[in-house]
Image: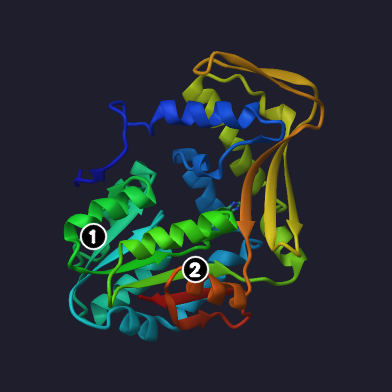
């Protein structure tokens, strides 16, 4: 097995259980219960997200794939502007989309190494091995950890040029305040000549958006419910997954897709690692995810407010999705 840099693992290989338990306790103790979408991605959750990306309703992945495929020459050339750089891929997953760029950068003989970052150690292990076979000339250093941790770790290479990828509309899970704070932090780790290529899901027919988060085959429902299964498995919970259901709703004015788990009856759930019982009334909800949709004007404003300038906006034909190149 190839070496990974692991920034936040417990000795048994899991994500910090104490932090998970603490977050779950805080979220389920609120008047309006919440669980964070960052906990979706255990190995089963990562697999389910792969399945979501293959759904006909989930236009995001196809749209971004189209952007990268159709405009790879321009994107690679702009990203690579001057000499050696680190290509840092925040939330890399299986890097299906990034590979288009990797192949193109390699074809253009650009000098770079690839630093995929993800909280799924399993995904990073697999990606490292796959790239070793598919693109043996591209040096890869996978990092298992949180985005900010990884950027901090990269400070060792302070003077070297960096290109940060934040694809797939991962920014969408942040609240507006969080996304501003996040962009400011990313910006603080970058210097002149560095770039950020960020994928943003654009506003469109609200029904198209809603369908993407409420697919016919129930994959998204399984993805959402997996959060409860994970609590059962890692924290000794006794959630009955049959007594909760997935509910998704889109607010077209705020541009926010919101996902919930709905308690289908009055019930109590014990979580061993917290040592507490949590009560649910019938039809009480747990908010699990926000997925923000942006206008290009908003993207522009976000750049301005965080001290980035927008270099180029790459769009698909439908204008469903934008990969925006921000420059420092
Ligand atoms: C991985 C955050 C981009 O919000 O579209 C997919 C996660 N949730 N279906 C998104 C997700 C439900 C996804 N991101």
Q: Is mark 1 within 8 Å of ligand 1?
A: no
Please report the residue visible at 54 percent of the width from the left and 65 percent of the height from the top.
61
Measuring from the top left, give residue 97's x and y in whole percent. Answer: 42, 67
Q: Residue 204, relative to residue 149: is it above or below?
A: below
| Residue 219 in view in this figure | no
Residue 47 percent coordinates (x, y): 48, 46
Q: Which quadrant of the figure has residue 252?
A: bottom right
In the image: residue 283, left or right of residue 60: right
Residue 18 in view (yes/no): yes
Q: Which mark is residue 191?
A: none
- Quadrant containing the C terminus in the rendered view: bottom left
The quadrant holding residue 11 is: top left
The residue beneath circle 2 is: 199
Q: Mark 2 and 1 residues: CB-CB less than 8 Å, in contact?
A: no
Label 1 residue SS: helix
Viewer-proximal residue, 32 or 91? 32
- Identify the residue under disc 1: 133
- Mark 2 is surrounded, within 10 Å at the Cα level, by few (under 14), some (14 to 19) or many (20 or more) other residues, namely many
Q: Quadrant of the N terminus?
A: top left
For the image shown, how many numbered marks are present on the structure? 2
- Front-most of 54 and 237? 237
> What residue sits 42% from the left and 72% below the top?
307
Residue depicted at x 58% and y 36%: 226
Q: Name which residue lies at 35% across and 66% down.
A: 164
Q: Nearer the viewer, residue 152 or 200?
A: 152
User: Which quadrant of the frame does ligand 1 lie within?
Assistant: bottom right
Badge nearest the viewer, 2 or 1 = 2
């Amino acid at each position: 097995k190839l070496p990974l840099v692991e920034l936040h693992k417990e000795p048994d290989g899991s994500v910090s259980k104490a932090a998970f338990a603490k977050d779950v306790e805080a979220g389920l103790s609120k008047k309006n219960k919440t669980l964070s979408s960052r906990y979706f991605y255990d190995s089963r959750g990562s697999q389910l997200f792969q399945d979501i990306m293959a759904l006909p309703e989930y236009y995001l992945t196809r749209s971004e794939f189209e952007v990268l495929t159709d405009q790879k020459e321009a994107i690679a050339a702009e990203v690579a502007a001057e000499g050696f750089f680190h290509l840092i891929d925040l939330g890399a997953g299986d890097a299906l989309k990034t590979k288009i760029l990797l192949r193109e950068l390699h074809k253009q003989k650009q000098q770079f190494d690839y630093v995929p970052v993800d909280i799924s150690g399993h995904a990073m292990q697999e990606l490292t091995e796959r790239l070793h076979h598919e693109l043996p000339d591209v040096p890869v250093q996978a990092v298992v950890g949180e985005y900010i941790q990884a950027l901090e770790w990269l400070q060792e290479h302070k003077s070297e040029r960096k290109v940060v990828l934040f694809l797939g509309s991962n920014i969408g899970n942040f609240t507006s305040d969080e996304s501003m704070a996040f962009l400011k932090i990313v910006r603080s780790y970058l210097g002149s000549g560095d770039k950020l290529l960020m994928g943003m899901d654009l506003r469109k027919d609200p029904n198209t958006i809603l369908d993407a988060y409420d697919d016919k085959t129930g994959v998204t429902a399984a993805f959402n419910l997996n959060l409860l299964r994970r609590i059962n498995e890692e924290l000794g919970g006794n959630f009955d997954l049959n007594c909760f259901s997935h509910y998704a709703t889109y607010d077209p004015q705020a541009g926010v897709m919101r996902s919930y788990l709905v308690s289908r009856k009055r019930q109590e759930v014990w979580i061993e690692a917290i040592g507490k019982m949590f009560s649910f009334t019938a039809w009480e909800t747990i908010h699990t995810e926000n997925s923000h949709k942006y206008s290009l004007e908003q993207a522009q404003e976000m750049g301005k407010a965080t001290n980035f300038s927008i270099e180029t906006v790459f769009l698909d034909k439908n204008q469903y999705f934008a990969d925006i190149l921000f420059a420092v």
